[in-house]
Image (cartoon, coloured by chain):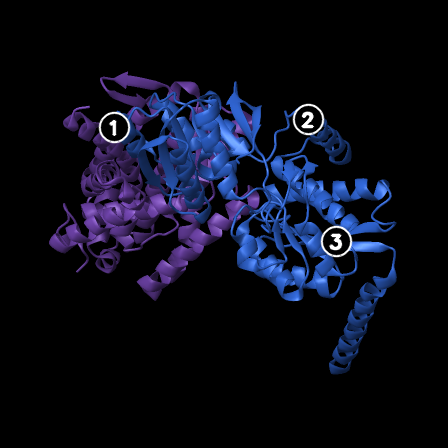
Chain colours: A purple, B blue
Amino acid sequence: MDGFIYFLIQSVNGLKLGSVYAIVAVGYSMVYGILRLINFAHGDIMTVGVYTILVLMTAFGVPLWVTVLLSVVIAIAVGLATERIAYRPLRTAGEEATLISSLAVSIFMQNLIMMIFSPQRRAFHLPEYLSRLHTIGFIKLSTMNIITFAAVFIILIVLSLVIKKTRIGMAMRACSDNLNASKLMGININAVIVTAFAIGSGLAALSGLMLAGEYKTIDPLMGFVPGLKAFCAAVLGGIGSLSGAVLGGFILGIAEMLFAGLMPTDFTAYRDAFVFVLLILVLLVRPYGILGSKEGGRS
Amino acid sequence: MRKLQKVLALLLIIALAASLTACGGGKKSDTINIGAIYNVTGGQASLDKPSLNGFKLAAKEINENGGIKGKKINVVSYDGKTDQATVANSTKKMIDVDKCVVVAGLSDSNYALAAGNICQEKGIPFITSGATLPTLPDQVGEFAFLAPFGDNIQAYACADFAINDLGLKKCYLLIDQSMEFTKTLAHFFQERYIANGGEIVLTDNYMNKDPDFSAQIDRFLASNSGAEIIFISGVPDDAGVVVKQFRDKGVTLPIISGDGFDTPLLIEVAGAAADNTYVGTHASLENQDPKVQQFIEAYKKEYGTAPENAFAGLGYDTMYLIADALNRATDINNPKAIRDAIAATQNLAGVTGTVTYKDGSRVPVKSVTINKVENGKFVFIKEVLPE
């Protein structure tokens, strides 16, 4: 096989993985941009969404679009509940307190899902029309891959418009700049934060569907690592910048696949280590991320 | 208030002392206490619960047939809760309080090591019914035995089967680098496959819980290595995911793996894509050997369900292994004599193969069952005994 085609195939593998990271990263970026909260529980909201879909699909036989809608609603409800219970009361206590609190929420949710279901991995199947494979040249993609890829850009465009053109978007930008000043200017920061959490949790549920559909298995810990990687993607791309989060997601996904596909096979199992070295190198050169700026970081 | 506490404490002490003497009292009785330590709750439960069921079923059968030297077997069983400290403490209790003369159980090396070390310390024979680490008896000491084959044997059987029965001499090897079990299995497979005249045309690696194999599969496709079979050294979690992704990328070659792939997840996750996958494991429900079919019938009658997996058979065989040794032992109250009798086990046929401890080894030479997935079902192919 031609070297260039091989490179292209591995890049497409990276784009498939990266588009899921990108969607999670956008949600992460919204919350982090405003609160500077590294929300460890973000990936576990994804898991909640996936298990909701599983229960609705297998137990009640509800059509897929209804289950997806319901799982997004439930993920948003859980996201808002954690914000209200575990983060809001700690908002004045400093970033460390909320960070630890989010880690606690994450572990709590993982264990709760293990208790309700079981720690065992189990099968997860999308309807046939979503997992059907299409051959385009030398590349094979499922319907779900194509939807995911398109979804990244639709989400990016819609959210960018919301942030640029609407009142709540303007308030979000203000809060991202300076939370306290925004409060003093009369902005309802709770409404802004709730909106950010709702968008982030909803996107997490969607990306969970995409991840579970791709790998056909789910387990109670499935969200944690993708959640962390998405956070890294958001930082890599430039925190607070939505296009940055998407770019970071794609770079991370492609880097993972290229490291695994091009390095000597002795190292392929350790691809994550190389990906994160790359992350450090990028941050050394661009401390605010690729598309980030100094103003993006809080003054 | 304080007085009440004192009274309560005193009562508790009395109750404790009473329970201790009650347990210790049965020394001169007409039963033999055998310890069965299993993790019937927690992560190991799917293997250990069937094992314990099989173990108890065998004990019941032995008692119905007159017991051992006129004495009945009494199975003393505690839940290890998939926790090494609980396993160790329960094992101690079995020996110190319940006076068990043999302890058996467990399906994972980490827990088997915990229990085995206690037994070795106290000089009580320990047989793990399901852990397959071949170095375990040597790590623990002379009182520790494996009832199943070691990882080397299952790897050898897979290699022999691929070359001798399937005639496939070029292999692509994919290894989970995150576990001792998978690394050992791959090591032994490669050693044997090459010794048999096969060639490993490409080796690649992955990490358990990293569910994306597309980079490895595309590298394999691009390599044009001419591989005829794929050996995947993996654990149940990944079994279905990796097979499905190979098939989705158009790889139709036979895939073979060890007992890590003996899981319903393989077929549940991969569906029709699981076909043409071979699994080297301990037993097959399809095996028409009357011993196997009788066991399945008895298990169904006792528990209302067919044996969940091969581990039920391993528990069953382990109890018979102990009974066989007790019948031959010069003194059934002397753990050292029992140990020597276990070590001398010869040609003991069971559901999961025939056990012989050869040349002082405490890992049995035992046949490996090769199952194949056909039309979404595990089908028995043959038993392989690596020489």
Left/right placement of residue A295 relative to residue B230 reads left
- Looking at the rendered image, the quarter that the C terminus of chain A falls into is bottom left
- Looking at the rendered image, the quarter that the N terminus of chain A falls into is top left
Comparing A270 with A297, the one in front is: A270
Q: CA distance from mark 1 to mark 2?
A: 43 Å
Question: What kind of residue is marked 3?
Answer: Ile
* Image mark 2: chain: B
Q: Report which quarter residue B19 is drawn in.
A: bottom right
Q: Which residue, given by chain and number where applicable, does mark 2 sit on? A: B289
Q: Report which quarter residue A90 is drawn in.
A: bottom left
Task: Please report the residue visible at 46 percent of the width from the left and 25 percent of the height from the top.
Answer: B164
Question: What kind of residue is marked 2?
Answer: Asp
Comparing A165 with A1, the one in front is: A1
Task: Please report the residue visible at 33 percent of the width from the left and 43 percent of the height from the top.
Answer: A200
Q: Which residue, given by chain and number where applicable, does mark 3 sit on? A: B34
Neighbour tally class for label 3: few under 14, some 14-19, many 20 plus, Cα within 10 Å: many
Residue B215 position in % (x across, y down): 28, 33
Q: Residue furthest front?
A: B359
**Callout 1 secondary element:** helix
* Image mark 1: chain: B
Q: CA distance from mark 2 to mark 3?
A: 28 Å
Residue A223 position in % (x across, y down): 40, 43
Residue B77 position in % (x across, y down): 72, 53
Left/right placement of residue A70 relative to residue A242 reads right
In terms of sequence position, does the residue under pointer 2 or pointer 3 come before the other? 3
Neighbour tally class for label 1: few under 14, some 14-19, many 20 plus, Cα within 10 Å: some
Q: Which residue, given by chain and number where applicable, does mark 1 sit on? A: B223
Task: Please report the residue visible at 43 percent of the width from the left and 41 percent of the height from the top.
Answer: B188
Question: What kind of residue is marked 1?
Answer: Ser
